[in-house]
Image (tube, rainbow, N blue to C red):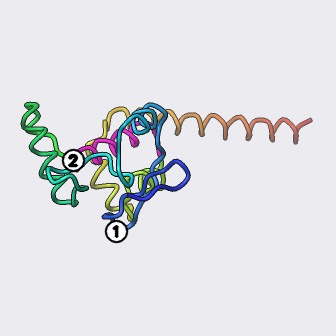
Amino acid sequence: MRWRAGCRVVPWQAEAAPVPIRPPLAASILATPSRAMVFIINGHGRSFTRKGFGNKFRDWCDEAGLSECSAHGLRKAAARRFTEAGCTNQQIKSWTGRTTDSEVARYTAAADQRTLSDEAGERLMANLCKRLANETANQLEKGA
């Protein structure tokens, strides 16, 4: 893991994405004894490989009774939540380390479609009202 300006960079991603470290996580990291910026180590006292971490995370999920969860699922869940919060594809790509809109679409397909549809309708109506107000103002100016 490399650090840049309060961000972490995961080296095993094809496109390493800087992710902001939020204050509660920063406090936890600072309180954790570590070597060479490694905070989660394997049974041999070394940093995990990508596959090794995924397997260990799977074990931890199973032990916690969360058989439907996975490390990769965290990224997918974050992408879905970003979509529901109104983030752009570019913002989601930046956070998740994905590089194409099609990858983001695959991650965000489970987003709350009803909420997104309602928000899209509200934006459409707001835009229509703004256009009508502008047209009315222009007509009044011409008539005055």
Q: Give the range drawn in magenta.
A: 72-87
Give 36 or 7, whichever is nearer the viewer.
Answer: 36
Ranked by sequence position, the earlier of labels 2 and 1 is: 1
Q: In this view, does 103 lie above or below 43?
A: below
Report the predominant secondary structure element of the magenta stretch.
helix
In-image side of 93 versus 110 (left or right): right
For badge 2, the amino acid type reads: Ala
Q: Which x, y percent locates residue 12?
A: 30, 64
Give me the residue at 18% from left, 51% from top.
42
The residue singled out by tag 1 in the image is 14
The residue singled out by tag 2 in the image is 71
Q: In which quarter of the image is residue 58?
A: top left
At mark 2, the secondary structure is helix
Q: In this view, does 87 lie above or below 8?
A: above
Q: Quadrant of residue 112?
A: top left
In-image side of 54 versus 105 (left or right): left
Q: Which x, y percent locates residue 24?
A: 44, 31
Give me the residue at 87% from left, 38% from top.
141
At mark 1, the secondary structure is loop
For badge 1, the amino acid type reads: Ala
In-image side of 23 versus 103 (left or right): right
Give 117 or 93, whichever is nearer the viewer.
Answer: 93
Q: Which x, y percent locates residue 26?
A: 45, 37
Give 134 or 61, whichever is nearer the viewer.
Answer: 61
Extreme residue toward the bottom, this view:
14
Q: Is residue 119 above or below residue 59?
A: above
Image quadrant occupied by the C terminus: top right
Q: Does the magenta stretch include residue 51?
A: no
Cα separation between marks 2 and 1: 17 Å
Crowding near the residue tagged with mark 1, few <14, some 14–19, many ≥20 C-alpha atoms within 10 Å: few
